[in-house]
Image (cartoon, helix red, strand yellow):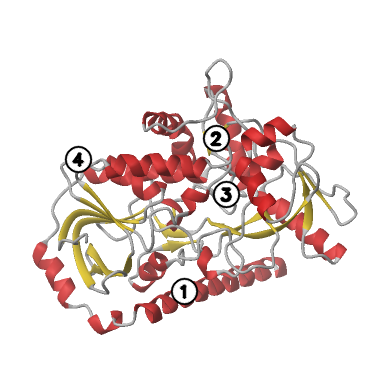
Amino acid sequence: MIKLEKKYDVIIVGTGVAGLNCALNISPDKSVLVICKETPDKSDSYLAQGGICRLPEEGDYQCYFDDTMRAGHYENNPVTVDAMIRGSQEVIDDLIGYGVDFARNPDGSLAYTKEGGHSRPRICFHEDTTGREITTHLMAAARARRNILIVPYVTMLDIICDDKACYGIVAKDGKNGRLYRLFADYTVLASGGIGGIFENSTNFRVLTGDALAICLNHGVAVDHINYIQIHPTTLYSKKKGRRFLISESVRGEGAVLLDKNFQRFTDELKPRDVVTAAMREQMKKDGTDFVWLDMRPIPREEVISHFPGIVQHCLNEGYDVFRECIPVVPAQHYFMGGIRSDTNGATTMPRLYAVGETCCNGVHGKNRLASNSLLESLLFAKRAAQDINSHYSPEDISAAKAAEAALDISKYSNPTKLLREYKQIVHSAIDAENAKCAEAQAAKEEA
């Protein structure tokens, strides 16, 4: 049995690409604890199908920048967008160095695909399992590091903090039921999105926004908590549980959306929120619960090589994509809001960082451009690690112990109840922000 120590140099909550890449970039002389609620593969990073963006050449910079800003309704932070694009080549080089096998052209150069909202192909991919390919290689590299300890089935219940800094976390071991108070000089929240609080989502059900609720409780700044992206194409099913995503790349390579009469009704390569709106309008008009996605315009050989996972999953559900259309429906997919963080992942609480989907650094704006998520998570997680390395200093032990002593331990006696409360906190915050936005819009229209 893995035993948790009382003190680590850095604690990272989450084993998606953000958490793993952060851990891999922390100085090897520092002890790093990485925890996750269930097994390490239960992250949305692992599920990512389409790919990861890369600036293919300097001449594409402005187009890539404009595509990202346009998709985000120009509410993006230009500084973080610039940092993401400028750092994209380095991120891909890092991944290749870890052994990630991206698709290649006959001459050995990287092959690029195109997705909705992109003006040209600039997305690196590995079949339709890019996230799994990246995550497994990062996990192997992390497990090989002597300074990194990865512990599954451990849930963060709170942070240990005062009004000056974060000193670590309170966590519950799902295996032995023990409650831990774990100190760290730096804590990194990389706990993913909030799909688990929605009935229909492409996310794993364990992703319930706990870190978001904890930050709200402690006054850590949160931005755009109501910016929630819906993915247009998930496989329609009456079964309960996570919805299976049909990658954006499918439409990027030529698949089309059809109404109940099998007539095309929209431009499939518009940004996700635009396609989602068109689908919902068509479903309302047709009186149906889904629309049809036709993959047959894509050459059979390309479907087999690029989308084998999608083909097999559809077969398991009774659909042969080579012979028929498949039913698709929009579902919650990505969270653009989150814990406020800067270009180095720092939050408004000293010694506390947030990276990946759980944070909001403004790079996505109001609507994420396809395949920017893996890139954004990897890049800013590395920058967070570099920031910790360059400014490293031990925490104030006396302050940390005082913060621990001030904890109300009874609060954590029923973790299940506490996590339900956290879900309600997130729901209430989303509702409040939606109401605030609606009120502002009404006032604007009256003026």
Tag 4 near tag 1, CB within 8 Å: no
The crowding category of the residue bearing disc 1, from other C-alpha atoms within 10 Å (few below 14, some 14 to 19, many at least 20), is many
Label 2 vs label 1, nearer the camera: 2
If you read the primary sequence from the N terminus, does the residue marked by circle 1 or circle 3 appear first? Answer: 3
> Marks 4/1: CA distance?
36 Å
Residue type at mark 4 is Pro
Q: Position of residue 56 (x, y in %)?
A: 54, 26
Residue 73's place in the image compared with 153, above or below, is above
Disc 4 target residue: 28
Q: Position of residue 321 (x, y in %)?
A: 74, 45
Based on the displayed image, in which of its 4 quarters is residue 94 positioned? top left
The crowding category of the residue bearing disc 4, from other C-alpha atoms within 10 Å (few below 14, some 14 to 19, many at least 20), is few
> Marks 3/4: CA distance?
34 Å
Q: Is residue 432 visible?
A: yes
Is the N terminus in the top left, top right, bottom left or bottom right quadrant?
Answer: bottom left
If you read the primary sequence from the N terminus, does the residue marked by circle 3 or circle 2 appear first? Answer: 2
Based on the displayed image, in which of its 4 quarters is residue 268 positioned? top right
> Marks 1/3: CA distance?
23 Å
Secondary-structure class at tag 2: loop
Which numbered marker is on residue 368? Answer: 3
Secondary-structure class at tag 3: loop
Disc 2 target residue: 125
Tag 3 near tag 2, CB within 8 Å: no
Q: Position of residue 199 (x, y in %)?
A: 60, 70
Secondary-structure class at tag 4: loop
From the viewer's side, name the closer residue of 87 and 33: 33
